[in-house]
Amino acid sequence: MECSDLFERGRCIALSPNGQFISTSMKSAVIVIETETSEQIYSFSTPKPAKSLTFSPDSMWLAITFKDSDLVRIYNMEEGRVHTDFHCGPALCHGVVWAPSSTHILIAVRFFVQVIIYSLDENAPVSIIENCKSMNGMKYSEQGDVLAVLERTKGVDYLNVINTASYAASDRIQLPTVDAAGLAVCSSFIAVWDDPCERMALLFTAEGTEVGRLSISEESELGVRAASFSPDEATLALHGFDGSVYLLPTQSDADSAVLDHDPIIATSCRAPVYQEVEVEASGGSTMSRYETVAPPLSLHSFSGNGVSNVAWSPSGTLLATRSESVPHAVYVWRLSSEPVLVSILAHSSPVRTVRWMPDVDVLCLTTSKSPLPGSGMQNSVLDGGKSLFFWSEQGASVVKIAVSVQDRVFGGRQERPFVIEEVVMPAVGSDLLLCDSNHYTVCSIKEPTDLFE
């Protein structure tokens, strides 16, 4: 794996889905850099510091929102100019979501008084939905053929199912929820989960017909934290506040399954357990690597806040999960007739990122720079935040990002290690944008499978 030089970044940073451009904010400007050459190709002046930068799925447009402003500015990346300036009104702009087709953008007004559907072809709003629930309450399917928006009006929840061919009309379905918390969308189904105290989720067809009501175990004090569909849309995963993942079939009478994150690894466990350990490196320094640990063993556990990460592999045959009750471990499952635990990855620090590479079933993890509370590792020099952790069915490996940064401080500069705070992946390819608080680097992986040789 090869990494580029370090570059300074602003408060906001974005990688285009095709991997060709990096955009970052710099005071009252936004710059665009070509990833391959690291050369600046555009510098856009802005009226205020940027709050968010969002590339369209086709990488042809860049949407910018601004702090304490109602302005959404959209740049044409081919021509390097402003395509439109749209003002939301006095309630200010909260955020934006691109349609997968890149022809429309959803603009959420602050406090979600409105969601404005804006057409780039017509250069004007084509529809407005009142009283949207939240950013978690407006989602497109991956193909863009379905748009669902949660609405709450006079204490009642509604599901708006919108025809993306015209955006002209929608089905508005009253929900039996107490206070709908979020939704998941695919081309065939829409899942809506209720307030955590209600322990309920609803399943609808993409046309808005209710086909099922799903419940978390009554033994759990709280219900659903989030939900996601498998790539083939045959399975709905409910991410429970109780620390379990509930796998429910959407199209058959197949049995459901529950994935638990038991910190006690019994002798009967056949899945390899990879433990991060400290080893000596050249020059007297230390680095992390994985070692296989034989059960039985006990992982550190806490009273966490449910399942925070559920990541489906590109093939849909593997699932990576992380529970806040075992925050430093990732459990990897193979999905067949019955889910099988195939690996556990345990670390010295809480896991921060759980992502699959876009084109291959290779899992990428990062960890927090802070050691695990109560683990006795407070004085450890393991590489929390300084390494990338990879897993595939070939094995597991650790790659240290051994670079230093020079931070500007009063009277000069201060050197410190580069700490990975965010990993951004393009929609295709195997380049990784690694972000520190003030810097970034681009790491290229020619063949992801070479990581395990």
Image (cartoon, rainbow, N blue to C red):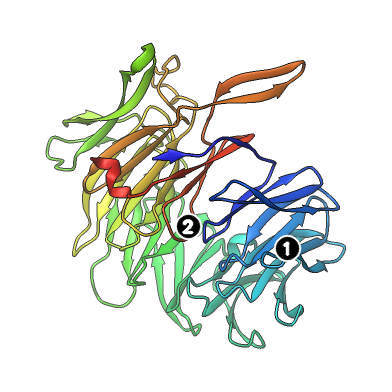
Q: Relative to 53, is 364 on the left or the right?
A: left
Q: Nearer the viewer, mark 1 or mark 2?
A: 1
The kind of residue tagged 2 is: Ala
Q: Residue 317 at x, y = what percent?
A: 27, 61
Residue 413 quadrant: top right
The kind of residue tagged 1 is: Gly
Which residue does the numbered mark 2 point to in the structure image? 226
Between 312 and 424, the one nearer to me in the picture:
424
Which residue is farthest left?
268
Which residue does the numbered mark 1 point to in the structure image? 80
- Circle on res. 385: none
Q: Residue at (64%, 34%) from the top-left corner?
A: 438
Q: Residue at (44%, 14%) from the top-left corner?
A: 379
The mark nearer the N terminus, 1 or 2, is 1
Q: Residue 303 at x, y = what percent?
A: 43, 35
Distance CA(mark 1)–CA(mark 2): 38 Å
Q: Residue 399 at x, y = what percent?
A: 37, 34
Q: Residues within 10 Å of mark 2 (few under 14, many from 20)?
A: many
User: Mark 1 falls on what kind of element?
Assistant: loop
Q: Work out whether 171 lies above or below 200.
A: below
Residue 260 visible in rendering: no
User: Mark 2 falls on what kind of element?
Assistant: strand
Quarter of the figure with the N terminus: top left
Q: Work out whether 299 lies above or below 40.
A: above
Q: Residue at (67%, 69%) from the top-left corner?
A: 106
